[in-house]
Image (cartoon, helix red, strand yellow):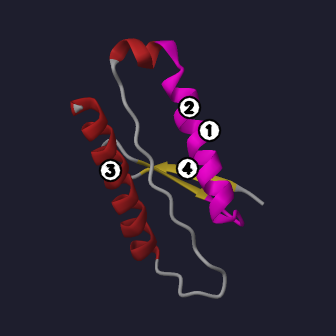
Amino acid sequence: SYDAIGRWGDDTFLILLFGAHASYAQRTAERIRRSLDDHPVLQASGVTMSIGVNAFVPGGRADVPGLVRVAEAAFRAATDAVAADNAA
């Protein structure tokens, strides 16, 4: 088994966790977010991170653009939630 990571646009990265269940992908995303939140250089620079997660169901139709659209929607929802928290 293997995973893959790549750049998807200017400031977006796509991580593929082959064979992972959605719950594992969610926990992995949260671990990544926490580790970067705790990084002193990123804290000092004010860099923020939002993560969207989606999962392909085995036996389903492999619609990669659709999977990415759903993950991007989750990312936007996370970004909006952070912005709302910061405004409050």
Write down the residue under mark 3: 9
- Whole-angstrom CA distance, mark 4 to mark 3, is 13 Å
Query: In the orientation shown, which residue stands out farthest toward the right?
Result: 1
Q: Amino acid at mark 3?
A: Gly
Name the residue at 45% across, 13% down: 41
Tell whether label 2 touches label 3 (CB within 8 Å): no
Query: In the orientation shown, which residue stands out farthest toward the left?
Result: 87
Tell whether label 1 touches label 2 (CB within 8 Å): yes
- Observer-nearest of 61 and 8: 61
Name the residue at 45% across, 47% down: 51
Write down the residue under mark 4: 5
Name the residue at 50% across, 58% down: 53
| Res 44 quadrant in image | top left
Write down the residue under mark 2: 34
Q: Earlier in the sequence, mark 3 or mark 1?
A: 3
Q: Amino acid at mark 1?
A: Arg
Q: Please, what secondary structure does the residue beneath circle 2 have? A: helix
State the mark number for residue 31.
Answer: 1
Where residue 79 sits in the image (x, y, percent)? Answer: 32, 45
The magenta segment: 17-40
Q: Please, what secondary structure does the residue beneath circle 4 have? A: strand
Name the residue at 52% across, 28% down: 36
